[in-house]
Image: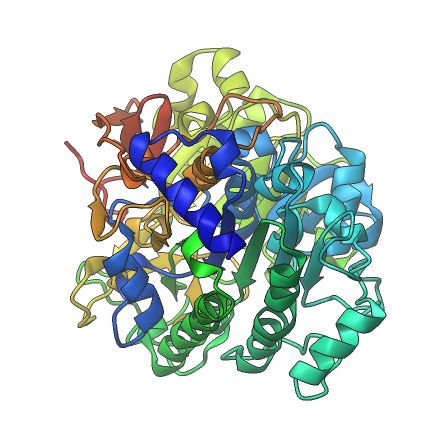
Amino acid sequence: MKFARLAAAAALAVAVAAALPASAGSQRNIVIFVADGLRYTSVTPDTAPTMAQIRREGVDFTNSHSSYPTLTTVNAAVIATGHFPGDTGNYGNSLWVNFPVPCRLNGTVTFVEDDCILRDIKGHYPNDYIAQTTIIEAARKAGYNTVVIGKKGPTAIQFLPALDSKNETVDGPLGLFIDDSTGTPTNADGSPTKSTMLGKDLGADIAKAAAGIPVPPHAGTPNIVQQAWLRQAVTQVIIPRLKESGKPFAILFWSRDPDTTQHGALDSDGKLVPGINSTSARAAIRNADASLKDIVETLKQYDLAENTNVFVTADHGFSTIAKSIPAADGTVGRPTLAPGFLALDVGGWLGQKVFDPDREGAELDPASGERPAQGNGLIGPSAAAPQAIVVSNGPTGFIYVPSGDRAVAKTVVAKLIEQPYVSGLFVNDALLAAGPKSDFAGALPMSAINMIGSSKMPQPAIIVSMRTFLIGGCLEAEPQMCQAEIIDGGLHQGQGMHGSFGRGDTRNFMAAIGPDFKKGYADKAPVGNVDITPTLAHILGLSLAGPGTLKGRVMEEALVGGKEPKVEKRNLVSDKAANGFHTILNQQQVGDTKYFDAAGMPGRTVGLVEK
């Protein structure tokens, strides 16, 4: 058969050299499977047998890294482009974008996991928001059939032009794009989704395969029904059409679970144990694994497996939420950190009013118990003239200073170093360069964590990484399974979140299998989501273009014939503030690519090594 001959020829080329020539690599297929929020140590033969098998029989990336902030859209852009956030401009799940976003009711602070909002941001910042060529875009330009399917937001980031796909055939000019807003013109609140519709024939075939359900169902906890619909669309309709087409293909499948369930599960509400190690969370991992299993088995069914590289990753790890400062033994009392505590604190330190950007700029009255709805705050004499803007990303807070006033930033940092909820601080390089370095003692520069690059998207003045700790009474064998983190937001103590600089969030699951990857190989070198696109582009012989130098590397050691790289380890340590507060960054490096294990104040960060 044609596919068998091509696979044999390409395998011979790989055996000769680790660097695949484009003529051979261009005929490979790739599948990128993203299990949202999957910790490395939560994958076991019981919870995730398919992932465990791929890790055992293919490449096990034992030293894996999510990019900081360990958030979904941050890492979606990293996975898509092979560039760190300083280049992509996607610094967080929520951003201050400095223009009225039409799809956000003209608000300037916005959550970006939304097709409509992504269109607005890209339209306003075409050369600064994800301006790099993505792996899906490069494959499409090279003549591949492409499919991106899954969770709203990160799926679109993989190839933003595909939001205009007609979803008629796999050979369409923009490939296939299906997320959980596809086929639904409006959201529940009546706002437009601006997602795709399904072509008549494709939609009919998927509905037939999915028990008559014509469009993706709403998300659930666990997300079984929606995930089943997406899985059936891929395995029963799309892969058979890709086989029939005869062209090489690239598929990206973004699974909402276990993330959605770990966020929303209530079986540990108010308690840190079991936290996100609960029954429902483990069911969510099995749910994601079931989707991967069906995709892998369908590839085998259609004689595509031998010529297809499957890369499995997670955008980030996960932690149990704490809403109060822990005792020395890792236990917590009743919640004391209500949503918006950072914005209200900053307002108090600056002696300014706080307005809620998620309530059309309404002024808050903290004395009467009013809180920011989503943890965000406009701080100043009026909502239209803020001195500072606080944007909550769970355990990471962004503080913007629109005027660039160094005195404002200095006042805020001087107070932050006194707060027990703070673990690490990072200050914009422009502020550091504009005066004495001692003004920001205790903080490291944002460039140290790859947050300053080619993008000119509005940048935070200060990044606050909040405290993580090991849960007292947690019986899990691996420390990362016992990580709790303080967050600023509306979820409850005992539910799940991510975004911190603790190792429980930075260590994501990563594994790969296929003709170009070694078999039964444990890769101990540091790797990260930033390396996925460079590696797959190398295998396929694709060219990537776009601004910025904050790039990942080809994971040559994981490829057939590849050698292990030289690894350097070091700590970056800030100057100490007068009270002793300082930020340590644990870093590994291969060539020019840096990987961050953990960062923060000693005693306030899980996995942090002082020396």
* Residue 7 location (% of width, % of height): 43, 48
* Residue 523 location (% of width, % of height): 23, 43
* Residue 398 location (% of width, % of height): 54, 41
Q: In the picture, residue 13 is in which quadrant?
A: top left
355 on left or right of 12 = right
Q: Is residue 545 above or below residue 199?
A: above
Residue drawn at (39%, 32%) of the image: 554
Residue drawn at (57%, 49%) of the image: 73
Q: Is residue 534 above or below residue 509?
A: above
The answer to whether residue 373 is seen in the rendering is no
Residue drawn at (28%, 31%) of the image: 587
235 on left or right of 562 = right
Quarter of the picture containing the C terminus is top left
Q: Is residue 499 above or below residue 382?
A: below
* Residue 1 location (% of width, % of height): 50, 57
Front residue of 511/339: it is 511
